[in-house]
């Protein structure tokens, strides 16, 4: 039996709220991701091997990553260093700039959202975080992986696709039930913001 592809992904979650931190950790682990949680931007930099330093381009301030992190998801409003500050430090580091960063917040402030997306964030989630958000993270983590790992993953996906064709009828029934459940979910009214368009992405149907 092969290793669950998602189990190979390591997410660094940053949030000063213990409740929100526990929630995001549970969602990530439920989605089979490896997860490390910290309560501040400065601690996140330590995990990444980038010590907090005004001159982040200095070779002395950047060490080799202590652990491999495939994605950083961080709260925006945190004391000391905001999620935007952390984003800028990561994108300003030659060693870390390719790590995808997703920002989350309970406040829907368009100017703040646009600034984060223009600053390099892959997406801006509005809290509360949902299971479907965890699925979307996988796309960004695949993009941030080395090419050889992406090719290996693609080969595994082809094998999985070929072996799953016999279960197509069952999958169709599952998808139908899922569509009904999602139609009743309040998440349909919860917007997401993506860097690709710098525009609101909403799945809510106009009534």
Image (cartoon, rainbow, N blue to C red):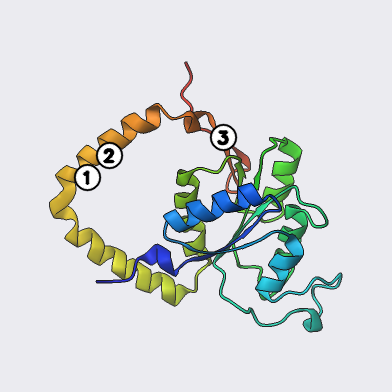
Q: Residue at x 32, y 36 (%)?
A: 178
Query: Which quadrant is home to the N terminus?
Result: bottom left
Residue 181 drawn above or below residue 114: above
On residue 71, the disc is none
Q: Nearer the viewer, residue 85 or 205?
A: 85
The answer to whether 3 appears left or right of 126 in the picture is: left
Q: Secondary structure at mark 2?
A: helix
Dot 1 surroundings within 10 Å: few (below 14), some, or many (20 or more)? Answer: few
The answer to whether 158 appears left or right of 68 in the picture is: left
On residue 175, the disc is 2
Can I make out residue 65 in this image? yes
Q: Nearer the viewer, residue 141 or 31?
A: 31
CB under 8 Å between callouts 1 and 2? Answer: yes
| Real-space CA distance between mark 3 and mark 1, rounded to the nearest whole angstrom | 27 Å
Residue 72 drawn above or below residue 201: below
Q: For residue 120, what is the image quadrant?
A: bottom right
CB under 8 Å between callouts 2 and 3? Answer: no
Dot 3 surroundings within 10 Å: few (below 14), some, or many (20 or more)? Answer: some
Residue 150 drawn above or below residue 161: below
Can I make out residue 203 in this image? no
Q: Secondary structure at mark 1?
A: helix
Q: Residue at the far top: name it.
A: 207
The answer to whether 154 appears left or right of 148 in the picture is: left
Work out whether mark 2 precedes mark 3 in sequence or the reverse, and give the earlier one. Answer: 2
Return the residue at label 1. Answer: 171
| Real-space CA distance between mark 1 and mark 2, rounded to the nearest whole angstrom | 6 Å
Q: For residue 164, what is the image quadrant?
A: bottom left
Return the residue at label 3. Answer: 191
């Amino acid at each position: 039996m092969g290793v669950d592809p998602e189990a190979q992904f390591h997410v660094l979650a940053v949030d000063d709220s213990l409740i929100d931190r526990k929630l995001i950790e549970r969602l990530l682990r439920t989605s089979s991701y490896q997860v490390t949680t910290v309560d501040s931007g400065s601690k996140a930099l330590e995990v990444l091997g980038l010590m907090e330093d005004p001159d982040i381009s200095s070779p002395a301030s950047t060490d080799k990553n202590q652990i491999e992190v495939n994605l950083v998801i961080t709260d925006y409003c945190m004391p000391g260093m905001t999620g935007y500050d952390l984003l800028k430090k990561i994108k300003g580091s030659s060693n870390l700039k390719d790590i995808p960063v997703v920002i989350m917040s309970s406040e829907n402030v368009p100017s703040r959202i646009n600034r984060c997306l223009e600053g390099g964030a892959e997406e801006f989630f509005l809290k509360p975080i949902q299971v479907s958000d965890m699925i979307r993270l996988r796309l960004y983590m695949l993009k941030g992986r080395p090419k050889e790992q992406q090719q290996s993953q693609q080969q595994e996906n082809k094998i999985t696709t070929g072996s799953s064709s016999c279960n197509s009828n069952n999958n169709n029934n599952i998808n139908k039930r899922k569509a009904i459940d999602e139609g009743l979910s309040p998440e349909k009214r919860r917007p997401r913001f993506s860097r690709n368009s710098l525009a609101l992405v909403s799945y809510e149907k106009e009534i």
